[in-house]
Image: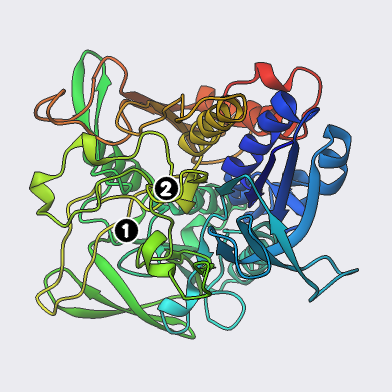
């Protein structure tokens, strides 16, 4: 009997676990290790953050779902990987520490035949002084609890505006190396929509701040979309939305310090600035969760299988080279560690080989550019592809049998810009491929026949349907496999 251990149960890890349990669970063991007791449909956190949904609307308990499916669930965090075994254990194993209140602090050794790293990111608020909801001066929508807190702070601002007190809102990224601009994009326009509906929009000044060098970069170097028979840049698309809704912007910005009511930042031209605010939601940069790796002798080999940012190395070309020399072929296809063939990394947990957006720095040497997004639809597709490969390897295949290269993968994104069944809107975008291939598609790097976008009420209905559809799928309810990734 083979044991597959999956570290993490977000979109990618839960997708892999669900399919593996369905495919091989009767004869083999699928073990899920995650520090969280609940699954969170993160795309809807932006609606929690403006009071349009509750935490309960976007989460569910994981334990009963895995119990019903037959998978082993351990509410614990992974501490270390021992891919060669150790002096007391010949099989490869990981060490875990329980976060389950009934076993809190207890540690355990867990052997594996196949290991999937799906831990996602560490929310690295500490990278910017004063950033974050716990010990900083900003709110967040990165978790359901963060989003609940953000909603409470937003409502307090609305009450002040109703009492005649003007408020300044600052929303975007909180560091020069952030990703997830899309989540902040959704949030700023949902805030604008809620303020308009509350009748206090005229009392609010709303500003976008981002490490993007142009609006509409989104960490994928921007894109051109097919609209009305011609190609329009995402820059034009984004600028029109910001201008139409009277939202100002500060771009090419690295937020380096946040005081109460003040965000200090550096721009790509090297100049420094300060933006005052009453309410700020700034996305933190992401890093690996800090798992260590040790060889059979107990020597630290973390740097051998993890990149400097803490994400796991896979079958990508990590050779340093100028940005202009990177190719689509440098991106991973099967997400297998090149040294330990029974270890895979999926979703945000794999180390990308290079930036998608062009690397930029200020004259002071400060990097200011988005890092590659690996969330949502691509995460789920990668998780399913790796699950298929492991299924086949358990059954005798010697190499991964399925691929999910982001340079050969299309993705759909529905970005909410206001939640209301009759007046809400969302920007619905499709992009193919996610990572541009300038050799195959000279000039713009993508196929315009499959890259297009529109904004309107229909997009909001789609976003709403996706919310309920993916919660149904994630709970493995009847017909869940019919819902695409």
Q: Is residue 171 visible?
A: no
Where is mark 1, residue-wise?
248
Residue 446 on image: x %, y %? 22, 26
Q: Is residue 400 visible?
A: yes
* 194 up-or-down from 287: above or below: above
The picture quadrant where one finds residue 44 is top right
Where, quadrant-wise, is the C terminus in this rendering? top right
Mark number displayed over residue 147: none
Where is mark 2, residue-wise?
337
Q: Write the residue at 37% across / 47% down.
A: 338
First in sequence: mark 1 vs mark 2: 1
* Residue placed most toward the observer, 217 or 65: 65
* 24 up-or-down from 322: above or below: above
Q: How is the image coloured?
A: rainbow
Where, quadrant-wise, is the N terminus in this rendering? top right
Residue 466 on image: x %, y %? 62, 29
Q: Write the residue at 15% across / 24% down.
A: 441
Indicate the secondary structure of the residue bearing disc 1: strand
């Amino acid at each position: 009997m083979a044991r597959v251990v999956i570290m993490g149960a977000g979109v990618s890890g839960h997708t892999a676990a669900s399919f593996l349990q369905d495919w091989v669970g009767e004869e083999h063991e699928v073990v899920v290790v995650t520090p969280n007791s609940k699954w969170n449909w993160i795309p809807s956190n932006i609606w929690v953050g403006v009071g349009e949904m509750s935490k309960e609307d976007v989460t569910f308990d994981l334990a009963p779902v895995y119990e019903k499916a037959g998978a082993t669930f351990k509410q614990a965090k992974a501490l270390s990987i021992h891919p060669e075994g150790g002096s007391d254990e010949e099989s490869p194993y990981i060490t875990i520490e329980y976060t389950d209140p009934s076993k809190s602090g207890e540690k355990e050794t867990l052997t594996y035949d196949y290991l999937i790293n799906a831990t996602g990111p560490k929310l690295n608020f500490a990278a910017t002084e004063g950033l974050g909801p716990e010990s900083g001066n900003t709110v967040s929508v990165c978790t359901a609890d963060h989003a609940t807190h953000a909603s409470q702070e937003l409502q307090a601002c609305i009450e002040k505006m109703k009492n005649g007190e003007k408020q300044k809102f600052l929303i975007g990224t909180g560091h020069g190396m952030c990703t997830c601009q899309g989540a902040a994009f959704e949030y700023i326009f949902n805030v604008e929509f809620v303020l308009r509906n509350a009748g206090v929009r005229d009392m609010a000044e709303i500003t976008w701040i981002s490490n993007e060098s142009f609006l509409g970069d989104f960490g994928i170097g921007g894109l051109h979309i097919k609209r009305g028979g011609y190609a329009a840049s995402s820059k034009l698309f984004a600028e029109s939305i910001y201008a139409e809704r009277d939202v100002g912007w500060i771009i090419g910005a690295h937020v380096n310090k946040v005081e109460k009511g003040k965000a200090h930042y550096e721009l790509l031209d090297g100049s420094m600035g300060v933006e005052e605010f009453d309410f700020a939601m700034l996305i933190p940069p992401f890093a690996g969760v800090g798992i260590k790796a040790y060889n059979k002798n107990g020597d630290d080999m973390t740097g051998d299988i993890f990149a400097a940012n803490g994400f796991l190395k896979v079958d990508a070309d990590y050779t340093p080279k100028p940005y202009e020399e990177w190719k689509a072929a440098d991106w991973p296809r099967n997400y297998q560690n090149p040294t330990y063939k029974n270890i895979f990394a999926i979703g945000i947990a794999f180390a990308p080989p290079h930036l998608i957006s062009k690397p930029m720095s200020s004259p002071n040497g400060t990097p200011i550019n988005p890092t590659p997004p690996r969330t949502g639809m691509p995460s789920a597709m990668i998780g399913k592809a790796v699950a298929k490969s492991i299924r086949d390897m358990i059954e005798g295949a010697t190499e991964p049998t399925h691929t999910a290269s982001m340079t050969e993968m299309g993705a759909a994104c529905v970005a909410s810009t206001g939640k209301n069944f009759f007046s809400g809107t969302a920007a619905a975008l499709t992009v193919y491929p996610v990572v541009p291939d300038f050799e195959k598609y000279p000039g713009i790097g993508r196929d315009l026949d499959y890259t297009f976008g529109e904004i309107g009420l229909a997009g909001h209905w789609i976003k709403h349907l996706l919310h309920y559809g993916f919660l149904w799928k994630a709970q493995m309810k009847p017909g869940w496999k019919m819902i695409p990734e």
